[in-house]
Image: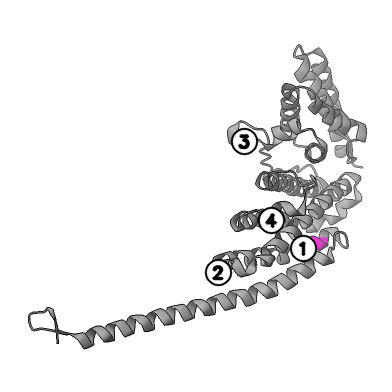
Amino acid sequence: MGYHKRLRIVSGILKDKGSLIKTTLSTKRHKASARRVILRATTHGSSVPPSDHRIAAVIGLGHGSRFTACTCIQAVMDRLHRTKDSSVALKCLYTIHNIINKGSFILKDQLAIYPSSGGRNFLNLSTFRDGSDSETCEMSAWVRWYAGILEQNLMVSRVLGYHLNSPRSKNEVIGFLNSDLLKELDVLVNFADYLGNVPADSLNLQRKSLVHEIVRLVSEDYRSVQRETFVRVTELGARMVSLSWSECTEFLSCIDRFEGCKERIAVLLVNRNRNDDLWGLINETKANLVAAIEKKENEGKMVVVATADNESDKLTRFSQLFRLAPSGRWVEF
């Protein structure tokens, strides 16, 4: 480890200690307590994920009042947006991910509020960059990608009406409108599409326990996305005869996009979450969709031809009954 890197780590640790002392002296006890919990879970100095008991302490803040939960989310977002350290940023995002997966309804609700409504979940890390050295530059790419994954996760939850890790019955979608199912399928495919944008040039960073643990959590999310996708593809496939031409083409577009993610996701997850049943369903449904679209297009052409022939017959009969007089008016023969 180089001198400058050691100096940076020591400086970060001292900053954390100074921040903890400030929270101890603060007169705003509830806010200071929440901030202390977040600081301890997202310390400088290592690429190790927060320990289970640190995460449990964060989750515990959601079992009190709504004010405490709000203070917790505010503290982790402030920490995330103020830091320039890639490891600290990843730990903040990892903490948020655990809130999404394990947090109480109140904690999740604070994350689910749109920024325009006063919420604090707008991660906005697309320009994050820690240029301390070559490794932190690579870690920065993971920060940007992971933030986007969590935003996609929250978007899926908003559209579906429940969080990805929440168990749901397959029969719940039976009463949904075609348009609702297509909208949900679209947002699920968006998640898979973004997942495939993993920083492929720095996959070697998975040797770090923090990055490895992040990939494990994301892999679990993708397994849930596959489950929800299977349910909606199955239901829409069963309705294929009643789908309109535009609905069929939208359905096919979603399937094509989902197929396009497969190889890119495999680069990250390798043989995890292969789900052969899902891909078998995708291939079968795609073939049926292509045939259904061709059939509907041919039926549409036949209707157009029949309509044109009908209009031509009407014009012929009219010309047999009337003639155009010199005055410019139609008169009977």
Identify the residue at image location x=69%, y=66%.
Answer: 238
Which numbered disc, 3 or 4, marks the residue that appears first in the sequence?
3
In this view, 268 is above or below 137:
below
Amino acid at the residue labelled 1: Arg
Identify residue type, mark 3: Pro
Position in image of residue 226 (x %, y %): 78, 57
Is residue 19 shown to the viewer in this render? no
**Bounds of the magenta segment:** 263-267
Q: Is residue 120 visible?
A: yes
Of labels 1 and 4, earlier in sequence is: 4
In the rendering, which numbered label is found on residue 174?
A: 4
Helix or strand or loop: what does disc 2 sit on?
A: helix
Residue position for label 2 = 245
**Is 181 situated left or right of 214 in this image?**
left
| Disc 4, SS | loop
Viewer-side residue, 7 vs 331: 331
> How far, Cα to Cα, is label 3 from label 2?
37 Å
Mark closer to the observer (3, 2):
2
Q: Earlier in the sequence, mark 2 or mark 1?
A: 2
Tell us which disc is closer to us: 1 or 3: 3
Q: CA distance from mark 1 to mark 3?
A: 31 Å
Q: Of 192 and 211, which appears nearest the observer?
A: 192
Q: Amino acid at mark 2?
A: Trp
Tell me the quadrant of the picture where the N terminus can be found: top right
Looking at the rendered image, the disc whose residue lies closer to the viewer, 2 or 4, is 4
Q: Earlier in the sequence, mark 1 or mark 3?
A: 3
Q: Residues within 10 Å of mark 3 (few under 14, many from 20)?
A: few
For mark 3, give the secondary structure. helix
Residue beneath disc 3: 115
